[in-house]
Amino acid sequence: MMGLPLLGLRVCDVTTNIAGPYATMILGDLGAEVWKVERLGGGDDARGMGPFLDGVSCYFQAINRGKRSAAIDVRRPEGRAAVLAMAAQCRIFVENFRHGKADELGLGFEHVRAVRPDVVYVSLSAYGQCGPSADLPGYDAIVQARSGLMSVNGTPDGGLARVGVSILDMGSGIWSALAVLAALLQGGGQARRIDTSLYETGLSWLAYHVLYQQATGRDPAPQGTRHAAFAPYGDFPCADGRLLLGISNDRQFARLCEALGRPGLAADERFATNPARLANRATLDGIIGGLLEVRPAAEWEAALVAADVPVGRVQAVSQVLADPQTDALGILAGGLVGLPLSLDGARPPVPGRAPVLGEHTRSALRMAGYDAAAIAGLIAGGVAQAG
């Protein structure tokens, strides 16, 4: 753990499910101590999300590795006081309650700032801290629909699709961690409040689609694997799998035609320029598909890579795990995916397994200043739970 940039910093994490825990996972992987406060009994709802590996939820294990779990009932005054005492020892505080709930529980920004004047306080919600939808609950798929992201994902025949990962949860976690790092970099010793939401993350992913709508007056439509601006672009069948082509200029198209054994296609007026290829996409896709489907994907991939044509096989997760590029990057550790970055040539290590519920309750309370008798009293009184 030596040399990690957040070493020595503590995080008080009162988040659940995916978005907030993903944010604190990033901070933990970068060296921070993450003290995760969970409800008594079941803990974070993600603990119950299947499938399970060795009795532990795959969801929970993936984004709570290396954290310390303290099971404390924040609804009771003694529990709230304990969490505030923990927060006083932590530079960073992260919550993802519904709008207004943190203040109702006595864990809002002003409450935490009163005990930790230099706190970096993160509120991560579904729709943000203002506006007519601020009080609504939100889940990744629902906000994918509401934010417009789902409208551009799917197939042209109207078959909409949810992005196959919790992209708004995880994206909001990334933005939260990035904002924390920015606040720490600025320094100054004063409290900072960070707000982000799944809805804002969804809008940010739309990026050029927003400008497209304003420039054309038309709503962008789902393209499947095709691209509204380039052709040929998308997946094509081979003898034993599928290849994804990404041709973005005329030079790449000419190289593709040479590699396919049809150099004349590049001079065909229907396909000579990208606008012409877009206008005749269906015809061109049929020609390319007919050429590719007679040979295995690996053979075509090798030939097209040698010709400097943008191409990649469409792989299942099992194939990705066996891909030599995955192995070369060393991004997997004990089945978990590490951070997608390296510092001075070394990837931050995955900091151990996810905690058992309440595994670190006693040490969390000791950190907060409670003595052995007080800790025993909180546990006996049902305010805290030790694993």
Image (cartoon, grey):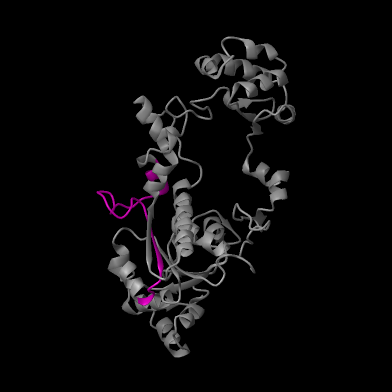
In this view, the residue farthest toward the top is: 269
Q: Is residue 266 left or right of residue 370?
A: right
Residue 97: x %, y % from top left: 35, 61
**Residue 110's x, y, as percent?**
31, 70
Residue 293 in view here: no
From this view, report whether residue 300 is shown above or below residue 338. Answer: above
Q: Is residue 255 left or right of residue 173?
A: right
Q: Which residue is drawn at 58% across and 14% down?
A: 271
133 and 16: which is toward the camera: 133
Q: Main secondary structure of the magenta part?
A: loop
Q: Is residue 241 visible?
A: yes
How many numbered circles are shown?
Answer: 0
Does residue 254 sit above or below 242 in this rendering?
A: above
* Drawn side of residue 183 relative to residue 100, left or right: right
Q: Is residue 51 above or below residue 122?
A: above
**Residue displayed at 34% across by 70% down:** 107
The quarter of the displayed image where residue 385 is located: bottom left
Residue 160: x, y in percent? Answer: 43, 33
124 within the magenta span? yes
Viewer-proximal residue, 122 or 14? Answer: 122
The N terminus - image quarter: bottom right
Which percent across, then down, holds residue 287?
62, 15
Which quadrant of the figure has residue 176? bottom left
As for residue 366 lying within the magenta part, the answer is no
**Which residue range is magenta in the image?**
115-144
Question: Which of the two residues, 148 or 228, is positioned nearer the viewer here?
Answer: 228
Q: Image point 58% across, 16% down: which residue? A: 284
Residue at 48% over, 48% down: 166
Q: Residue most toward the bottom?
A: 373
